[in-house]
Amino acid sequence: MADKKDDPPVGEDSEEESSGSETESDSDEEEDTGLTENQNRLLYVCDLYSKKAESAEDSDQWVRKPALVVLIYEGIVSNVLDFDYAPQSDLIENRRVWLNISQEGKSDIEFLREEELLSGLQISSRSYKPITCYQITAKGKELVKRVNRKEKEAVHEFVYMRGSRELLRAVWDGNSYWLESASGYRRKSTITDTEDVSYVSSAYVPQCLRYGGRPTLSNAHRAHESAVNTNQIRDELDEVITLNSVSIIVAEYIPFGANQIVQLNNNVGSTERVQGGFISPAVDDDSGGTSMEMSPELTSVDILDYTLTNHINFEAEIRFQEDHGVIQVETFGVSLNAEGTCFYGMQVEAVMDRIKDNISLDHLARLLVDVQQDSSAIVDSIISQYQRDLMQLIFLGDASNRNKVNLIIANEITPHLTAEEYMDKGEYENELKQVIGDTKAAYDISEHDTLIFGAYGLLVCGPNSRHHEPLLCAYLQFITIDIFVQNYFARMWILSDDMATTNKIIDMSESDPTSLGRIRYRICKLARDIIQLDEILGYLLEALEIIEIPPEPPEQAGRSLYERLEISGMRSQLVRRTTDLKKNIAGSQRYLDVLRERAHVVSEGKMFSLNENLESNSKKLCMLQENNSDTAQSMQILQFMFAGMLAFDLLDRLTGNWTVMNAKWMESFVTPLVQQNPLVWFGISIFMWILVGFTVMKVFTWQKFKSQGVTTIRIRMNKRIFVEKLRALLAQKARSYEERRYEEEKDIVKLTYEERDPKDWGGDRPRVVIEYDERNQYLLDVTMSYNRRAASKTLGFNAEELREKLLGQFEHAGIYDHEGEDHSSFDLAVDKRAAIELQIEAEEAAGEAEEEAAGEAAP
């Protein structure tokens, strides 16, 4: 890549060859744009993805920086852009991930901005991190017209879907970047797949952190093991800077205290006769059992020195399985203290085929990814569950990828330049950015020693660099707290957003019948988070009180370094910032109290509404009971009288003047039996009354028996629906009763209908009472009554079958609004992260299942 100082000025005057940026030049001749080939192609990419509004009704189109970084990476792996890339930790939508980022590509983008070919826009995001966006300027569009067809077609290789002119857009799904087109094409980007390198390291603990004990062991005799011929790097690396005799210290802050150090010493066996051993973060669920099985991927711990309540130093050898062809002999020197600063140090013995010296920064950047990830695995396996919970709280369930600070100490840097020469906005500075982040400043602390500050680390090079370890370690103590406070402050914004969302849910509680349960859950989680954040604040303040500021060294180089590190002023700044956080926590606690009170009001309101309904229903039941009692008595009397009347009518029909009683054959029977014998006809009448009454009572009892064989199912739905589709379904039913209740926030409709065809329901037509909120489109309750005694004995439905058939009708009619039912956008931040983790686990399980299936299918 060309040095930005040597780039020629960009020409502004050119002949127009086409009417728009999308139109390609008719000529393949090379025209001088004043830019390098990479810069031409980057400018064309920005032209494709951004657009200036042509009128007030149109919208500006900007391309986001993270998406542009993904496109640059895709251009590199497609051999279209000639840049290097290296893994770097970045925050994407509150998730910290490792991305293969090209510092040269980012530098060229900044150069295009300096030349006013691109405009920049800073906009805040929901993750409370400002997002930079880019848009091509009019000057840039004029320059794009001079880019020849060959270069444009090269860009088309990675920005368009193959075989079409559909632009691919970078889409983040919470775990990975995907390239998607408008037609539905989708493929996963490998930008999150970091590359491993083979290396050999020894434990390294600065002498200023030691309190006796044996020295660390060296793996220098195993340096040759990393000289393997295979590696995972997908790009050809251009080495510009190399280091000799490299030591790395990765540091972070974890809330610690004296009791936590005591517990940690007990966990690793510092006080036992045989110290150390293997450690694992796994939890034993059957501690009373005899034996257990565990993965062989463990960490070996060997204690160096410790004090029971203040610190512990130990060696940790990582024994994790690596990919095929990658050899990593990984030993850390770990120093933990009661102030909360955790140091993970290693002496680099060899990287790939480079033994001790001539270590490439490209390789070192990939080594640092391993150090950052494995150091998290080491410390997470020995700290308490309480501390792990605090870290998961601050880093939103992603503590394993938390950001740390890198200190790189080298005896020599090649080429050896002045500090100003390293800050060249070109190849030297881009190379340094790979290991320490965006460079901030560089200083010559002596004639041979150089100090370079980066966004997430610092590099100290020179023969006397190790003499400054006490100052550097003191600086790391404060800078790790600084990083932790930044993450803490960001977490406070997320907490405030969660509370504001909870407040919105409370506002919608009248229209959302499912809200009360979610409100209670959220308030409990928020209360727990605030309590833990307050505890963390106490640990921070305690750490700032007890961390000692080293005195200013007497020698000139030491004084120069002391001045550049500004250690003396860092404590007061951090104390002030931490005190400021106390005000934020206090405000959050008061806000939570308000939410609790509002939730209590909502709960009381629902309880009051429920009591009103119960009182109304009780009054109706009492009135019905009185009416039913009177009706039952009247019915019994009427039944008795009706039986007698019916019996007498039957006899009257037989003995009337026009009946057979006038016949001679009947007279011979009736006259001696009825007319000449008193009370015989009366007895016959009474007998007929009893006979008919008995028959009527039997029929009534049978009907009553059938009517009592009713199965009633009640389903509390509380589901979001499409009211129009529900109306279409109800229009097909035999509706019999409808009741509407209009309230301030909702319109309740209660409707009764019967199914039309009893054959569909086993011989009986069930009656369904459905209650729904028409205004807010919620199905509230469904009640079904079904007479199983009236149905066929063989075809009748039981309760579970009725439920399944009824819900199947609703599902078939498509009344459910599943998207409206999705409240994931209102989830707490930690719940959103948990959902992403479940998605990752599901994808991994699906991938393993596919691999197993492919293995079984293979001959």
Image (spheres, helix red, strand yellow):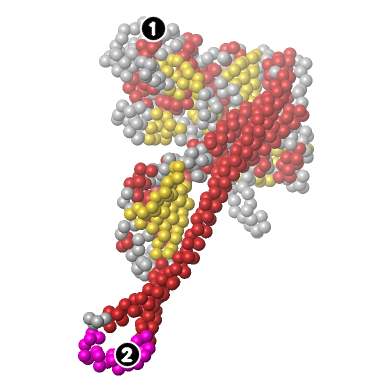
Q: The disc labelled 2 sits on which kind of residue?
A: Val
- In the picture of the structure, the residue carrying the numbered disc 2 is 674
- Return the residue at label 1: 12
Q: Residue at x 65, y 30 (%)?
A: 587
Percent from the top left, x then y, of residue 183?
33, 33
Foreground of the two, 582 or 374: 582
x and y percentages locating residue 104 in the rendered image: 48, 20
| Label 2 neighbour load within 10 Å: few <14, some 14-19, many 20+ | some
Q: Does the magenta stretch include residue 676?
A: yes
* Left or right: 688 in relation to 323: left
In this rendering, does residue 213 appear at all? no
Residue 561 to residue 298: above or below: above
Q: How far from the left and from the top, in percent, is residue 97?
A: 53, 32
Q: In this view, does 739 lie to the left or right of 564?
A: left
Question: At 30% across and 29% down in the image, what residue appears?
Answer: 164
Residue span colored magenta = 660-682
Q: Is mark 2 on a helix, strand or loop?
A: helix
Q: Which callout, 2 or 1, points at the residue further toward the start of the chain?
A: 1
Image quadrant of residue 152? top left
Q: Residue 544 carries which label?
A: none
Judged by depth in the image, the label closer to the viewer, 2 or 1, is 2
Q: Is residue 816 magenta?
A: no
Q: Residues within 10 Å of mark 1 (few under 14, many from 20)?
A: few
> In the rendered image, which quarter is residue 307 located in?
top right
115 versus 626 height, above or below: above
Q: Looking at the picture, does residue 238 appear above or below residue 142?
A: below
Residue 14: in sight, yes or no? yes
Identify the main secondary structure in magenta.
Answer: helix
Residue type at numbered disc 1: Glu
